[in-house]
Every structure is written in C-alpha cells, then in structure tokens.
Image: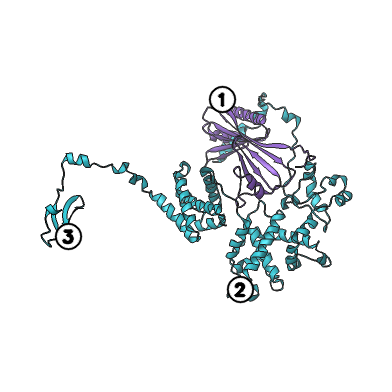
Amino acid sequence: MAERGRCPECGSAALVEDAHYAQQQLVCAACGCVLAEGLLTTTYTDEEHLREVAYSQSTGQKEQLSRCLQRGIRRVQDLCKVLQLPTVFEETAVSYFQRALQHPSFHLVSLEKKELLGGCCVFVTCRQHNWPLTMGTICSLLYAKQELFASVYLSLQKELGLSVPALSLGDLVKTHLNSFRLFQHAADVPAPFVEDKEKMVARTMQIVELASETWLVTGRHPIPIVTAAAFLSWQSLQPPARLTCTLARFCKLAGVDLPPPAHLRLKELLEILLRMASQLAWLRVFKVDKKTVVKHIGDLLQHRIFLLKNAFCLEDGEEQRAAAPGEGSLGGRCPGSARAAGGAAQEDGCPSEGKRQREGGPRPLLPPCLINPRKRLRTAAPSAADSAVTGDEPISDSEIEQYLRGPEEIRAFRKAKAW
Amino acid sequence: MDADSDVALDILITNVVCVFRTRCHLNLRKIALEGANVIYKRDVGKVLMKLRKPRITATIWSSGKVICTGATSEEEAKFGARRLARSLQKLGFQVIFTDFKVVNVLAVCNMPFEIRLPEFTKKNRPHASYEPELHPAVCYRIKTLRATLQIFSTGSITVTG
C-alpha cells in the first residue's frame, strides 16, 4: 500500500482496492476519493479465465422456488397462523407440502387441489402431534368440498406413506368445547345457562367415554357425539333451569353448528342412560323417562361400570332357562364378547329378537345398527344351476333376440326422433 | 376366539367386474336405437346395456372396450360377456371376443362378533387406516394380495381386489 502513495484529497495512507460493479478502483478508505480505475472492458483471453458457471447450471437456479410453490407455502403458513399452531407444526407442514408437490401425482393437479393439498398437510401435521383438528374445520377454512378434501387426503397419505394416528376423543372434546360461548356471561345468554367450563368438560368427557363403551362412537363421526354429550352434561349440571331448552337452542346459544346426526346420538345416549337408570336401586321406584333421567346423570356416571354390567350383560343361567331353544344360541353375551355358534341363525333372529326382549330386561350390548337393522342381510344360497356355469356354453338365437328391438319398434323410435 | 365356537364363515361373492374388447369400432347410436334394455349416455360417450340372465350391466364404449359388472362368479361373468358380444354381433358389428379379463371381485363376509375399530386400528397400524369422519369402516390393505378389506364394527367385512 505504501508504494501507491497517499490520497491527494486528505493525505491518508489507507488506500483500498475495491470494485464498483465490474470495475476495479483504488479508493481512499478515509475520504472515499477514487484514485485510479481499472479497465471496464477486457480481452477475450481475460474473459476465458474469468468465466464462471452458467446460471442455469448453478445451484442458485434450483434454490429458486416456483411461484406456485411459493403461493402454496404462504397459504400453508397462513392456515397455521389462523389456527394458532406452534412454529414446529408450520415447518413440518411446509416440508410435507414441498415433498408432495414434487411428487408426480400432485405436480400437475388443478390449483384447487393444490390448495387442498396445503390444507391436508396442515391436517396431517396436527394429527401426528395429537392436535385435535377435524376435517370439518379445515374444509370450512378452505371453503372446500368434503369429498374432494377426502380424496386429496387419502392420496397424500398413500403417496408419501405418512402414518397418521387416530384422532383422540379426549382432546377433541376439550377443543370443541373451547368454541362454546356458554362459559361467560353475555347479552344473549340467560344467566341460568352460563356454566363452569371445567365441570362441563369433565362431565362431557365421562359421557363420551360411556358412549364409546356402548358402541355409539365406533364408525361414527365424532363431532355430533361430542355435541350431544355436551348438551346432556350441560343440562344435567342445572336441570331445573335447563330441561326445557332444546338441542337446537343450546347450539344456537353456544354459537356452534348443530350437526344433523346429533339428534340421533342424543336419542341413543338417552336410551343407554335409561337402561342404566333401571338398574340403579334408588331410581327403580321412580318412573324415569327421557326428561327426568337427565337429573340423575351424575349418579349414573359415578356408578357406570356396575350399571353397564347389570343393564347389558345377560346372565347365562337366567337367559337359557327363560329362552326358547331357538333363542338359546344368543345367551351369555357380555359386552364385547363373541357370539355363540349359530351366527348365521342370529342374522334371521336379530330383528325380531330385539323386540322380543322385555322392555325393562337386559339387552345385548351391540352397535345400534345391529339392534335395529335396516338392511336385510344377505344369505349365501348358490343354486345348483349357477354352480354348473362354465362360461363357455353355446348361445341360442332366441336368447339374444330378447335384447334386440324389432323393426317396427326401430321405425317408431326413428320417427319419434328421441335424440 | 373361543375354541368351541367353530363357525363356518360364509364368504359370498357379490360382484365380479370384467373387461373385454370387440376389436372393432361400435356405433353407439345404432346400439341405442336397435338394442333393447339400453341407456345411451351421450354426454359421457357410452352405452349401458343390461342383460336379464345373468344379471349384468355392461358399459360399452365406441372404441370397442366393454366393461361388465354385476355377475356373481367369474364363470357367470364370462357367460354374460359372451352373450353381450353375441348381441352386438347380431346388431351387425364385426365383433371378435378378445382380451377377456376379470378385473375386480367383491365379496362379503360376516364375522360372528363385533369389532372395536379404534383398538383394531392401533394394533394393525401400517395396514389399517381408520377415518371416522370419512367412512365408518377400517380400510385394511394387503399389499401382497393387492386386496382391500373394509371392516365394519358390526363384523361385516367387504373384500375387494
């Protein structure tokens, strides 16, 4: 640096070589005076040595994200913010989305599906971290049809090989009840209707557990069950003031949607509670019906194991003594145990069996669709003629004639010009 | 399962889907005009033709590809497919019955016990998938057999593949 001299402006010896765009310059570090400039143009020989890797071959090109991917990632991040998810969830969801979009089966799908794909990634992330998020919530946030979301979700699960754990009912209850507006005083909520959140959550959890033990949860959508259980627990905590309130009014006051199956779930829950009430010693003297059983839900839940056992398990000796030989095959059923041999006969007997049981007597603990079957169950009865079919039999003309129209018919159709 | 509950399980085939080719172009309008028991879906470009015996519904495309559904056994499917090809021949097309293949067989079976689906799914994790919000049954895939089973809580099982 000494040999380059000093700056003519300020006399400083601190001179540095710096580049201004592609031009080398000698600049004073103290005052910024440009002492000398390099050549702007170079010869071909110089260029050869300076030739860098072309941009298309550099890693910079690959790191640049496509606009579609950028938009998708922004959408995923927005969804996570709206749902107030932790940052870890956002990173996982974005990584799933990037992986999925590079997959051949998602690369060229419609924009609508790509948006749903983002929602699916968020949904999968939440389920993997046991964060209770339902498909209904995501669909309503994305304004998406449930069927389309379902197909995208299933193909995402299959293509990326993601293992998605089951939805935890306990967490779902807590999250769903968080959205209820009955825990604080408000202008449109009458004072007797306001309830303590902890008590309501605890009782709703117990009712949902009861429902899952009595086959009301398996195979059904979880939200209507949680809604019906929340309604019953709310009513039972202050029966005098709340028994006259209907399920629809309750949902309106709570500010949640009333899912259509909730009425059926409520009916099934009340039926189970009534059967349990019939076994409770101090309730036997009262005539308990669907309205009054709500008042005793606390007691029923407290003793539910004992009551379920008594209300639904058939005692072996009692059943076989009382039953006709045809019904005897159904004896000795306890919750969840296997049916006795003669399962085929059971299918014919079941519809009438449920009705043949005495009103107050114990009934088998079965899923509701088996107690009241709507379908006629198929019986295998292959005829001898069918079993002899080989597929290569000769075909007669008369057999084929029945599938062809006659000439008059054809003329009539042509005249009518059906199309 | 108890050792003394030896129940013979009846597995009942409810549907067999097969395809075959006629190796000639088919005029769907002609089939719709001259065939009985046909439905012409002009917007999609196919004709549905139903046979009475065996109870089969055939979807016919103009390219000559035909899909038959509704048979209750593979032999019956071939029986029905041949009858269909013969009907098309009678209508005047140069039909050659080729590439007959059974594509899918659907069977139903009833277990003599109920099944608790959440616990079942937990114990059969990689193969079983259960989404109560979408479908009330557990979807159990057997990769080696390329079969899918739908297991319901009532004990009813539908096997496809």
Q: Which chain is purple?
A: B
User: Residue at horizontal 64%, vertical 72%?
Assistant: A193
State the SS at label 1.
loop
Q: Specify the quadrant that holds the C terminus of chain A.
A: top right
The quadrant where residue B71 appears: top right
Q: Which label is found at residue A44?
A: none
Residue matched to label 3: A32
Residue A248 seen: no
Q: Nearer the viewer, residue B32 or A197?
A: A197
User: Residue at horizontal 84%, vertical 67%?
Assistant: A285
Q: Nearer the viewer, residue A301 or B138?
A: A301
User: Residue at horizontal 63%, vertical 76%?
Assistant: A191
Please tell me if label 2 and label 3 are on a single chain: yes
Q: Which chain is cyan?
A: A
Residue matched to label 1: B96
Pick out the residue farthest to the front: A2
State the SS at label 2.
loop
Q: Is residue A21 above or below residue B92?
A: below
Residues marked 2 and 3 touching at CB (< 8 Å): no
User: Which chain's residue wears label 1?
Assistant: B
Residue matched to label 2: A189
